[in-house]
Image: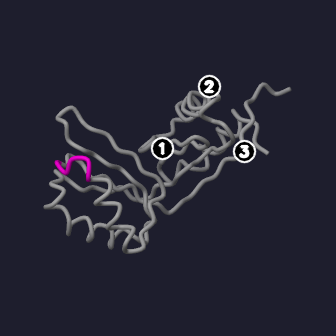
Amino acid sequence: MTGKMAVGGITRKDGLVLVRILGARAGHGLAGRALSELGLRGINIICVTSFIDREGLNNICFAIRKEDLDQSLGILQSISEEIQARSIEYQSRCCAVSIYGPHFSERPAIAGTIFEATAEAGIELHLISTSFSTVSFLTNEDQGAVAVAKLHEKFLVP
């Protein structure tokens, strides 16, 4: 018995860009407006998270393929007046790491173990996204292999 928690698997996707729409006054429609415009033009969102800041402004962060960056920035600039964002920023050379398995939402300590492992390895986290069965994060592309290796140390992976 290893004492490790069993998971369904760990994946890594390189070649991503993190896009941030910050300080938007678009209200509840920011995510729908921005992500719909991108989707209508064939741009896939890999993972997304959003939050309201202390000033009550909307912020959304999402990952796209690096090949879609120029088109995405053009689309976001075309709606920037409507969404009233303070800034639209991006960070290149990112990767997504995901750990998945059944019933994650019912299993304590999954997220804690993941993020203790990334902290131990000195992994810089740019975005965290979760679902009922998956925990994903964006980090620098050059840290992806280290992150995956560290997670393999902490979890029982088939």
Amino acid type indicated by mark 2: Pro
Q: Position of residue 5 (x, y in %)?
A: 73, 31
User: How much space separates mark 3 and mark 1, taking CA atoms?
Assistant: 17 Å
Residue drawn at (63%, 45%), measured in percent from left and top? Answer: 148
Q: Earlier in the sequence, mark 2 or mark 3?
A: 3
Q: Please tell me how crowded label 3 is: few (under 14), some (14-19), or many (20+) other residues with Cα within 10 Å.
A: some
For the N terminus, the image quarter is top right
Q: Position of residue 131 (x, y in %)?
A: 54, 43
With 54 as the anchor, is 91 left or right in this view? right
Q: Please tell me how crowded label 2 is: few (under 14), some (14-19), or many (20+) other residues with Cα within 10 Å.
A: few
Q: Nearer the viewer, residue 98 or 43?
A: 43
With 49 as the anchor, is 139 left or right in this view? right
Position above or below: 73 against 139: below
Amino acid type indicated by mark 1: Ser
Position above or below: 95 against 137: below
Judging from the image, what secondary structure is the residue with disc 3 in? Answer: loop
Q: Position of residue 119 (x, y in %)?
A: 52, 31
For label 2, the residue is 108
Question: Would residue 133 be counted in the magenta stretch?
Answer: no
Position above or below: 80 against 145: below
For label 1, the residue is 129
For label 3, the residue is 8
Residue drawn at (15%, 60%), measured in percent from left and top? Answer: 82
Question: Quick check: marks 2 and 1 in contact, CB under 8 Å?
Answer: no
Q: Which residues are magenta?
A: 25-29
Q: Earlier in the sequence, mark 2 or mark 1?
A: 2
User: How much space separates mark 2 and mark 1, taking CA atoms?
Assistant: 17 Å
